[in-house]
Image (tube, rainbow, N blue to C red):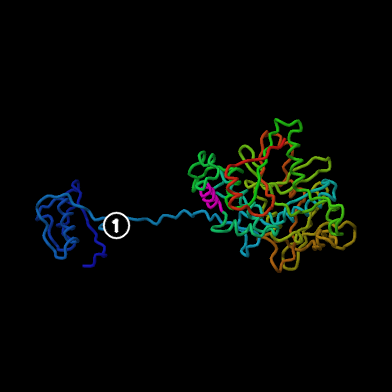
Amino acid sequence: MDSDDEIEIIGESSSRPSCAQAGPTLCQLCDMNFDSENLSELQRQQHYETHFNSSSSKQPSNKFKKPAIPKDLFKPCSFQLPLRKKPADEFWYPTLSRPPPDNCCPGLIPLLKHALKQYHTKGNTRRAVLCHESATHICVEAFDRRWGCGYRNFLMACAALMDQQIQNIYFALLDDPFPPGVRNLQRWIEAAWKEGYDREGAKDLRNLVDTNKWIGTAELYTAFTFRGVPSQLVDFDLSKSEKGIQVMIDWIVQYFSPPNPKQGTVTDVLRGASPVIATDKMPLVLQFNGHSQTIIGYEISKNGDTNLLVFDPSRPPRLSMRRAAIAGPSSVVWEQSRTNQVLQSVKHPTSNGRSSKLKRPSSSSDIQQHKRSKSSGSDDEIIIVEDSDTPRNDQGSGISPGQTQPLTLDPSNAVNHFRLGTRKLQRKQNYQILYFPMTDPWSIEERNKRKVVTSISCG
């Protein structure tokens, strides 16, 4: 008999009534009548064991023995339970050819740059400076929602570092032997600990891989140093400074602001004259008690206040903003302020039975109103003329190749989403910033000198 065949064994219950006994209980292999032999249940089990443990069918011994049940003899009932999907933990950066995952949003820096220019035109923004345009917003997912902010800020830093051209060698340092990721970062840090990096952090956190433990800028510094990517920590203790939060604001403004050369090309002069610019600076990681964020630049408002512009890993952009960022600023029509908009829709039946919406014309003429986005010869908005009776289609992640319908955004919503005002910053006393000086990679000797986490104190 093939041992892989399935055998069904029907056992008797001692409490079963006699009227339920339809016939004798037989061995399914040799038709032995268990009732006539008056074997116990344990002896019957031994009988079956004999069939599988010998080549010939022998009758079981009457001597009582505790049977050893083969593990593969009886198969327990199994149910097809839905498998829990393991988090993808997929790392994405802008130069990849595949589309970004749902929690990644590239293209926000160019979009924010155009929104700030709109705000400047209306007199709401004096000046704004942004980081490298490749900076990508990466937010937490379901599996790391309560503890993943430090990891996601790390991934945002890596996405920018792996797309810049100042230090091309950083890409290989961050991608080999395995690329960044939430769980991979935990492996990076533990590998660094084994090499003697940050012994204090290793003692505090101990086992990190596959856990939900929080990490901060000190752990990010350890990971980057271990890979040879230069980074530096800066501490701000606002309680020790008479200027308070302004000490950190001034430092951030100085970091992002490009130098002012006495002489330069016409392009340099025009670039310096622009009220809103994007630079080649890498984003910063800002750590404070309970949370961390990625700083992507700053904005000086009309009253002179300086607002930080941040990517918060716990606050993803709206879907409409993500679509616009992926599609590009040229696919966006910027709305006027809602308080100044006077739009009234009038339904007109068409020949196919559907209705179309027309904006009320500014004059009594029958000429239809067109929606227009201003443009200049530079990288400002491209002029897009939109017929008011064109049906809208906001589905999808952006503008499809054959689609001419632009996306409509309110610049105030776009700017406010990324603003971090001074009042919020004043609620904390201690901050730490991780920044990248973009110098040559550290040698083994230079890395060994930085195994102990150190920082610069400002304030």
Along the viewing direction, whichever of 200 and 388 lies nearer the viewer: 200
- Image coords of residue 142 (percent x, y): 55, 49
**Type of residue at label 1?**
Lys
**335 sits to left or right of 285:** right
Residue 224, horizontal then vertical, whole percent: 60, 50
**Which residue is at 71% across, 37% downward?**
458
Residue in front for this viewpoint, 393 or 15? 393
Q: Answer with the quarter of the image where residue 451 lies.
A: top right
Find residue 56 and report its horizontal and vertical position in percent.
Answer: 14, 65
Residue 248 position in % (x across, y down): 73, 39
Principal secondary structure, stretch drawn in magenta: helix
Query: Is residue 424 visible in this depiction of the protein?
Result: no
Identify the residue at image location x=76%, y=54%. 278
Let me know if residue 57 appears in the view: yes
Q: Which of the pair 359/371 is nearer the observer?
A: 371
**Where does label 1 land, which residue?**
75
- Image quarter in which the N terminus is found: bottom left
Residue range corresponding to the magenta coloring: 181-192
Most foreground residue, 354 or 325: 325
Measured along the vertical axis of the image, is residue 327 above or below residue 256? below
SS for tag 1? loop
